[in-house]
Image: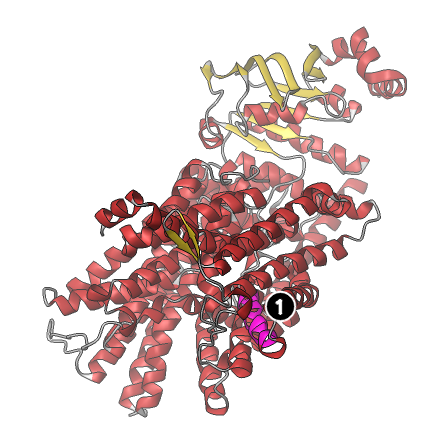
Amino acid sequence: MDLDALLRCVGTTSCVVTQLTSGMIIGMLLFLIASGVTLIFGVLNVINFAHGSLYMIGAYAAWTFYQLTGSYFVSALGAAVAVGMLGILFERVLMSKVYGSNVLMQLLVCYAVVLISDDLIKIIWGPVPLSMGMPPEFRLPPIRFMGGVIPPFYLFMILAAMAIGLLLWLVIVRTRFGSIVRAAAINGPMVSALGIRVNLYYAAVFGIGSALAGAAGALAAPVRSLTPGMGFSILIESFIVTVIGGMGSIVGAFVASIIIGLTRSFGSIGFPLFVDGVMFLIMALVLIFKPSGLFGREHR
Amino acid sequence: MAGRWRDLGLAALGLLLLLLVPVFGAPPAIRDFIMFGMAYGLLAMSLNLLIGYTGLVSFGHAMFFAAGAYAFGLAMQSGKFSIPGAFVLAIGFTALMALIVGAICVRLNEIYFAFLTLAFQMLFYNIILGWVSFTGGDQGLMGGIPRPKFLGIDLADRTQLYIFCSVAFVVCIAILRQVVTSPFGYTLRMIRDNQERAAFLGINVIMVKLACFVISACIAGVGGILLTLFVSGAYPNFGFWTTSGEAIFMILLGGSNVFLGPLVGTVILRLLNDITVTYTSHTELVLGIVILVLVLGLRKGPLDLLAERWENRRQAKAQAVRDAADKDAQAGRDA
Amino acid sequence: MLKLENLKKSFGGVAATRDVTLDFADGSLSAIIGPNGAGKTTLFNLITGRFPPDTGRILLAGENIAGLSQRRIVRLGIGRAFQVASLFPTLTVSEALAAAAQAHQRRETVLRSPFPLAATTKQGDEIMELLGLTRVAGILSRNLSHGDQKLLDIGLALALDPKVLLLDEPTAGMGPEERWRMIETVQRLWRARRMTLIFIEHDMDIVFKVAQTVRVLSYGSVLAEGTPDEVRTNAKVIEAYLGKSAHGTAGQGATA
């Protein structure tokens, strides 16, 4: 517990800028993953407990593409597309078989997928942590801002995640695809009675959610070490984000991700041992006072 | 009443069989297998009280397993407690933790419940990892758990430890049996089947769920204590999410609608583990594939399928009784 | 026994119940009729506390129960069966009734075993006898015929020893002959238990033959109330609810 350090940090702009940036990159990674979880839940009414694995696969795929092409942008895009396709496969072959069943069966399918993908990662990429290193595109002098230092890649990450989020929001709110998806979220059978092939939309939503996780993995690859099992802790945090923001709400996921990101970065200075505890406290308070989350619809 | 005597008789018989193992000088490997099986068996059996009997799909049950283990281990290492004292303390701690976690979680719907229990488990796991000075972090509780004599029992002796664990195990199974066959156990089934209707019969659904959650956590805690005594240590992976996942898998393997199903599942999983380990280092891959085959193929545990058949046969008989009665009634009306 | 005073309830600005005032005498057998969407089921939901009324009072034996929790209201003696039978699929008929009885008697103990306790078995057996369910005692609720499911639903409510029993369309989804058998059973249990019984029904023949008093709801308010004869000849009812074709049915009911 070192609240003095926290106070000292808040007193200097350089420290605030640094912590804000690191909080934002944590938050934006969480946002990409949580928005996938929340989108899939909102439309399909299932929780994808294997979402963290998709993030992990995205990171490893980006690593491999980067080794092959040497271009970070190509590999990030490739990872997102590949994980998106994998997500569609996962949905069609496995998840769609247990939509009608109880939560236990969905949980078990996801559990199996997590086990299998962790082991496959070990088989394909080896158990030793990998690191991608900073791609040459971003080997630029750091940006100085109000006394703080911001690595260019961090800025890119934050902006890219925000752009993806904005794009997702526009697709859902403004396009025909989005309105069908929103309708399917409220009443799937009704939409399918209108002659729309709901299954295709379900697969598409799962694919988009997965691609978001893949993109998050690709964005994390240069700044995180790649290990089998890296998806799990971020999965838990993305769940916390979805609970705080409200299941099914993209805006909620965005706001809650920033809350959690900043709690993490500033908390690591002031109360490093209690960061997890504080995150859970925030979640518990939201659950007690507004169980549907900050931006969630009331429970159906 | 007959059912109760039969159950007690079966429990005594089970205990006798367990106690006969050392008498016949079974190899240590078998005894170890049974000891592990008893500890994890209690985890799976207690979890099934939630999943199978109450419809509460918890993905965080291992946190109570670890809570019992660590509380007991730390109490013993402090040197201030006898074994029974530490036992009671550890169960009390587990119950308190379950009360807090449960109070937040049992009010939520099925999906929220599943991943909030998962999330709390990760919080607990992170505390174990982070609080190195107290819990030893990722090294676990090292240096062994002291096992002072009490009431003339010396748990440092392998055979006496085995007997102690067997008795504790059978007592816990008997307690679980009592819970599921008691009126309270049928209240749990009502909640599983239709909680809105249960509330409409005046049942306080949240309190009943909470009580069930605490009972189940305590039994899991005993499982953790047994494991701690057995391995003379406590490790963070007792409370890792994969341990909860394994417990759920044991229930699937055995069957959630048969009382001893999870125990059978425990044995199958441990055998499966031991067999795959000898052939490949990729046990997770094998387990994952087995789960997918079971879930997508059978959709139920093997024992559940047998139980279902038996139930169908009984139902056919009951329906024959009804049809005969209805025929008589119809004849009466026609006349 | 049960008095509703100026009950109002709206959902998102749409009034489902507007200013309903009704009085159900102790030990009476009353029917509530009205076209679809008239607010009949909403009225039951208000009485049983599924949601509270916006304004108004619900008096059970003179005591206001509006705004109490569903559970409290059940404990005070209002039982209810549902339009779509709400059961416990994996319990047999005798188990379900004993379990309902033990909930009412507060005998949900862990310490005694095995289920069912003698006291609850006895109560369950009486209910099975009364409703003619003894022949299906060992059948799982999910395997029952539609008619038996509706009976069991009523049985679960009876296990609470209610002072007031609300039946939401007891004959829904039944053929003509089965309907009459059901309504005879309802009459029988009303006589046996001497409770205040209120049922929602669409079949006019049944309503006019069985009920002592009839209340007609339309668009969330009370259109008419009185004895079957009074209601049948009420001009407003004929115009607003019975219409031309239904009038014929009602007439047949009178001569039947």
Please identify the dominant SS of the magenta region. Answer: helix
Q: Is residue A17 above or below residue C62?
A: below
Question: Residue drawn at (57%, 55%), measured in percent from left and top?
Answer: A160
Quadrant assignment, res B267: bottom left
Based on the picture, tell me whether residue A65 belongs to the magenta stretch.
yes
Label 1: which secondary element: helix
Q: Is residue B279 above or below residue B178?
A: below
Question: Residue drawn at (56%, 19%), measured in percent from left and top?
Answer: C27
Q: Nearer the viewer, residue A35 or A299?
A: A35
Q: Position of residue A216 (x, y in %)?
A: 55, 61
Q: Residues within 10 Å of mark 1 (few under 14, many from 20)?
A: many
Question: Residue drawn at (49%, 53%), measured in percent from left and top?
Answer: A239
Q: Position of residue C112 (x, y in %)?
A: 35, 52
Label 1 marks a residue whose chain is A
Based on the picture, tell me whether residue A1 belongs to the magenta stretch.
no
Q: Nearer the viewer, residue A253 or A105?
A: A253
- In this view of the protein, can residue B135 be seen by the observer? yes
Q: Nearer the viewer, residue B311 or B40?
A: B40
Q: Position of residue C10 (x, y in %)?
A: 62, 20
Image quarter hosting the N terminus of chain B: bottom left
* Horizontal side of residue B134 vs B18, given as left or right: left
Q: Position of residue C180 (x, y in %)?
A: 75, 32
| Part of the protein shown in magenta | A53-66
Image quarter hosting the C terminus of chain B: top right
Quadrant assignment, res B83: bottom left
Residue indicated by mark 1: A79
* Horizontal side of residue A62 vs B260, given as left or right: right
Q: Nearer the viewer, residue B49 or B102?
A: B102
Amino acid found under the numbered disc labelled 1: Ala
